[in-house]
C-alpha cells in the first residue's frame, strides 16, 4: 500500500512539473521581447581604453563611406568641413571637399535666398529640405542626424559588465551598436512578423526591424589605400568616423585624464608623507 501511495505521489509530482514547465514555456513565448534581440558585437577599436587613439586612415575611409553612401539620407549638421583637418586633410583639401556641396545663404540685396558652394565654416548640408520631405522620401521614417549618433545610440551592457567597464573605461558601445546593426541584417525567422516595408535586424534597438534597407554591399565604395572593400570593413570604418564626429576631442580628453591621474597619485603620496612627518612628532 505504501509503495502504491508513493508511486501515485511521484506521478503527481512529475505531472505537476510537466504542467508548470508547459505553463512557463507558454508564458515565455508570449512575454514582451526586449530589444535589441542580440547584444552588439564587441569590436577591438583603436580608440578603446585609456590610451586609445583614432586611426586617421580609418577615419578618412569612414568619411568616404559616409559621403558616398550615408549622406544621401543622413545629415550631419553639427560637423563643419574645417573639422576634417583633424583627420589629416590639408586646408586646400578641405576647401575642395566643401566645394562639392551647395548650401543656402542670404538674403541677398534683393531679399532673396540663394545657393552657393560650401566653405570650411559650413556644416554638412542636409539631404532634405525639412523633416517632412525626409519622411516622404523614406516611407514615413525620418533618417536621424549622424552628428552625435555614436553617443546617442548605445546599448546598455547591464550587470556585471558595467562594473568592469568602469575599470576598462569602455565607452565604445555606440560604435559597437552601429557596426552590429550595419552587418546584422538577415532573413526574419519563421513565424516572426515584421511590418511591411521594413527589414529584419536583431541588433536594432527599437524593435525587430527597421525602415532602412541594408545600406552596404561589397565593392560599393572604392578605397584608395588598398583596404578590403567589404561590408565588414565599410561598417568598421564608418562606425569609427561617426565616433569621431560625436567625440572629436577624445584623444585630448584621455591625455588630460591620464595627466590628472598621475598628478593625483603624486599629490596623494606627498600628502601621506607630510601627514606622517607631522604626526610622528606628536605623542599619542
Image (spheres, grey):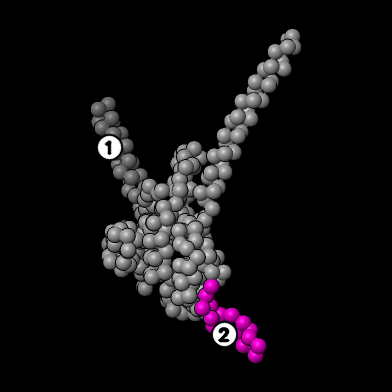
Q: How many numbered marks are there?
A: 2
Task: Indicate which disc residue 213 carries.
Answer: none
Secondary structure state at the residue bearing disc 1: helix
Q: Which residue is mark 2?
A: 114
Q: Position of residue 148 (x, y in %)?
A: 52, 60
Q: Is residue 233 left or right of residue 240?
A: left
The C terminus lies in quadrant: top right
Crowd tier of the residue under label 1, counting other residues whose Cα lies within 10 Å: few below 14, some 14–19, many 20 or above: few
Relative to 6, does residue 193 appear above or below in the rendering? below
Q: Is residue 281 left or right of residue 243?
A: right
Secondary structure state at the residue bearing disc 2: strand
Q: Residue at x 54, y 83 (%)?
A: 115
Q: Position of residue 114 (x, y in %)?
A: 57, 85
Q: Earlier in the sequence, mark 1 or mark 2?
A: 1
Gap in Å between the C-alphas at discs 1 and 2?
85 Å
Task: Indicate which disc residue 11 carries.
Answer: 1
Answer yes or no: is residue 152 visible.
Answer: no
Q: Nearer the viewer, residue 17 or 45?
A: 45
The N terminus lies in quadrant: top left
* 284 falls in the magenta region: no
Q: Residues in magenta? A: 103-119
Amino acid at each position: 500500500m505504501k509503495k502504491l501511495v508513493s508511486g501515485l505521489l511521484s506521478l503527481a509530482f512529475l505531472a505537476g512539473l510537466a504542467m508548470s514547465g508547459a505553463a512557463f514555456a507558454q508564458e515565455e513565448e508570449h512575454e514582451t521581447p526586449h530589444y535589441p534581440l542580440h547584444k552588439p558585437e564587441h569590436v577591438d577599436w583603436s580608440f578603446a581604453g585609456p590610451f586609445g587613439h583614432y586611426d586617421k586612415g580609418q577615419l578618412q575611409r569612414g568619411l568616404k563611406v559616409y559621403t558616398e553612401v550615408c549622406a544621401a539620407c543622413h545629415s550631419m549638421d553639427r560637423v563643419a568641413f574645417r573639422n576634417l583637418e583633424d583627420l589629416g586633410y590639408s586646408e586646400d583639401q578641405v576647401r575642395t571637399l566643401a566645394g562639392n556641396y551647395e548650401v543656402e545663404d542670404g538674403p541677398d540685396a534683393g531679399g532673396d535666398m540663394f545657393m552657393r558652394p560650401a566653405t570650411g565654416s559650413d556644416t554638412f548640408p542636409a539631404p532634405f529640405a525639412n523633416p517632412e520631405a525626409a519622411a516622404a522620401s523614406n516611407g514615413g521614417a525620418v533618417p536621424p542626424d549622424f552628428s552625435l549618433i555614436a553617443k546617442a545610440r548605445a546599448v546598455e551592457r547591464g550587470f556585471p559588465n558595467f562594473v568592469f567597464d568602469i575599470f576598462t573605461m569602455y565607452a565604445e558601445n555606440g560604435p559597437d551598436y552601429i557596426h552590429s546593426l550595419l552587418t546584422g541584417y538577415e532573413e526574419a525567422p519563421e513565424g516572426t512578423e515584421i511590418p511591411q516595408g521594413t527589414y529584419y535586424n536583431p541588433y536594432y534597438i527599437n524593435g525587430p526591424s527597421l525602415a532602412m534597407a541594408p545600406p552596404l554591399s561589397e565593392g560599393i565604395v572604392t578605397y584608395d589605400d588598398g583596404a578590403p572593400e567589404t561590408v565588414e570593413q565599410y561598417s568598421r570604418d564608418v562606425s569609427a568616423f561617426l565616433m569621431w564626429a560625436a567625440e572629436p576631442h577624445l584623444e585630448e580628453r584621455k591625455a588630460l585624464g591620464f595627466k590628472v591621474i598621475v598628478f593625483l597619485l603624486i599629490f596623494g603620496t606627498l600628502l601621506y608623507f607630510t601627514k606622517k612627518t607631522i604626526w610622528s612628532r606628536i605623542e599619542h
